[in-house]
Amino acid sequence: MFSTIYSGAVCGLQAYLIRVEVDLAGGLPAFLMVGSLGSEVRESRERVCVAMKNSGFQIPTGHITVNLAPADRRKDGTAFDLPIAIGLLQDMELLKEDAVKDTLFLGELGLNGEIKKAKGVLPIVREATRRGIHRVIVPRENALEAAVIPGVTVWGVGNLGELFTALLHPGEVEEKIYRPRVCPEDLLKCSGGDRRGDFREVAGQESARRGALIAAAGFHNLLMMGPPGVGKSMIAGRIPGILPPLTLE
């Protein structure tokens, strides 16, 4: 059996989608992973096998091959554990293709089947929606972060068994815990109230204040040099107070 599960990764601030291709065939027992993988990704095979066993899934004896495409990009991190496990469950015919269609999976697996927090969720979900994927399944700790992106359905899950049940019967459990939503405008209002003072509180240092004003108005870099206690941190901390409110973008 062969399956393809969507996941994602980040390079700097840019996100890109990863196709996790999982093949389960007969032959001598083996678990091979290819696709320009970092050490954390290569260790996924041990985490996935033990997590599935402790979640009640017995992986059949055979030759397992996992390819993370595109193969020319380096993959690091532990967030590929969950899509690999889902691909195996589909190859084992425990999940149908419709259950994972147009869905992105992210998450690290603990040995007990727990789905742990992943890094880079926000840019990955943003890229997924841009590419036409409108359902993402992430660790529960990342659910609110992912739900900031408009137009996406977020499922926040805590362990592999819980996710398996949700994929088999989405209508029964979806309304219970799997649609965390936040209003981006409310988040921006909260952050907008977190100001670190006003420039009126700075006495003197006219040249430094003017430099900060020009940098903020023109989106320039700013380098302040001087001995401790002359007001560098105080001025820098008040720059958000003269910037316009943040937009969602």
Image: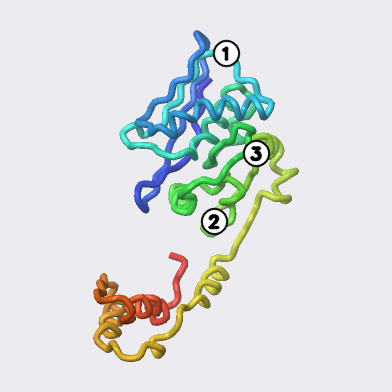
Q: In the image, is residue 98 above or below residue 10?
A: above
Question: In which quarter of the view is residue 9 placed?
Answer: top left
Res 116 quadrant in image: top right
The quadrant of the rendering that contains the C terminus is bottom left
Residue where numbered disc 3 is placed: 159
Helix, strand or loop at label 2? It is: helix
- Identify the residue shown where x is 56% and y is 30%: 85
- Which label sits on residue 214? none
Q: Which residue is mark 2?
A: 145
> Mark 2, residues whose alpha carbon is within 10 Å: few (<14), some, or many (≥20)?
some
Q: Of label 1 and label 3, which has the lower sequence position? A: 1
Amino acid identity at mark 2 = Glu
Horizontal and vertical percent for residue 48?
55, 29
The residue beneath circle 1 is: 61
Few, some or many residues within 10 Å of mark 1 (<14, 14–19, 20+): few
Residue 176 at x, y percent in the picture: 73, 50
Q: Secondary structure at mark 1?
A: loop
Disc 3/disc 2 C-alpha distance (Å): 18 Å
Relative placement, left or right, of 202 versus 169 is: left
**Residue 69: image x %, image y %?**
39, 33
